[in-house]
Image (cartoon, rainbow, N blue to C red):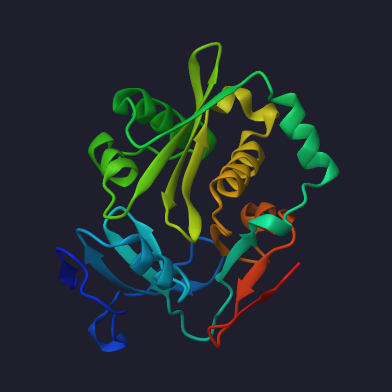
Amino acid sequence: MDFCYYPALPAGLLDDDILTVLPEERCPYLPGRRARYRAFLAGHMSATQYHRLMDRGFRRSSELFYQPVCAGCRECVPIRVPVTGFAPSKSQRRVWRQNQDLVVTARRTEDRPELLTLFLKYQKQWHGEERAEEGAEAYLFESPVETEVFTYRLKGRLVAAGVCDVSRYSLSSVYFYFDPELGERSLGTLGALWEIEHARAAGIPYYYLGYWVRDCGAMAYKAKFRPFEVLGADGVWRAGG
């Protein structure tokens, strides 16, 4: 498959006709559905350009920027949280209190072997997936935009990590993972709460959680961070909760 590749994305947004439409594949969210994406590759992109692309419904994985264009289905809905209006629920406040013994650090660079080891453990034990080390390293660390890694440590031991893309207008959650042995701590919820608070402290107005699929149980947590906004098919963000 030949993608459009940009060593540096030119000024302005992409025209629809220069995006590569990928073959259909099994939908990762809804059983019995087929998924299709359009995508391009970029070696570098400004934070402002990336924010604008997210506002068109694009996400990224390493250097690949993609958007779902599934025939007859618009269930993948971009979702974001207006940071200043966010109010944690009672259960979310409880998760925050229960994890006050963790030390959280935000860095642009971090010890890769330690992060990679935890990621591979999480993929195998939590999702039942074997990931090749080389591909996992590219997924976590190859980024054409400004990216930070948030690390969560318990008595010095790395127990969770969150990869986020950063711009003046948005903090975008790329991936969060944790030690499966500490599943009872609800570290995924903690990660989102901490990232929202980080955005608030930095004066960043929006926290992006990627796509929300209403009927996918694995996506249900995203709608628990309220109030939230969703991107309509007309390109307008509207209150969703």
At 42% across and 27% down in the image, what residue appears?
118
What quarter of the picture does the N terminus occupy? bottom left
Left or right placement of residue 90 versus residue 16 in this view: right
- Residue 165: x and y, percent? 41, 51
- Residue 194: x and y, percent? 61, 39
Left or right placement of residue 167 versus residue 236 in this view: left
- Residue 202: x and y, percent? 53, 47
At 40% across and 71% down in the image, what residue appears?
53
Q: Nearer the viewer, residue 196 or 223?
A: 196
Numbered label tally? 0
- Residue 44: x and y, percent? 22, 59
Q: Nearer the viewer, residue 64 or 70?
A: 64
What quarter of the picture does the C terminus occupy? bottom right
| Residue 182 visible to the viewer | yes
At 45% across and 58% down in the image, what residue appears?
168
The relative height of residue 102 versus residue 52 in the rendered view (above or below) is above
Q: Nearer the viewer, residue 206 or 75?
A: 206
Question: What residue occupies the far top of the structure in this picture?
Answer: 155
Q: Nearer the viewer, residue 47 or 88?
A: 47
The image quadrant that residue 81 belongs to is bottom right
The relative height of residue 174 versus residue 75 in the rendered view (above or below) is above
The image quadrant that residue 52 belongs to is bottom left
The image quadrant that residue 155 belongs to is top right
The relative height of residue 17 versus residue 90 in the rendered view (above or below) is below
Left or right placement of residue 87 versus residue 236 in this view: right
| Residue 1 visible to the viewer | no
Question: What residue occupies the far right of the structure in this picture?
Answer: 90
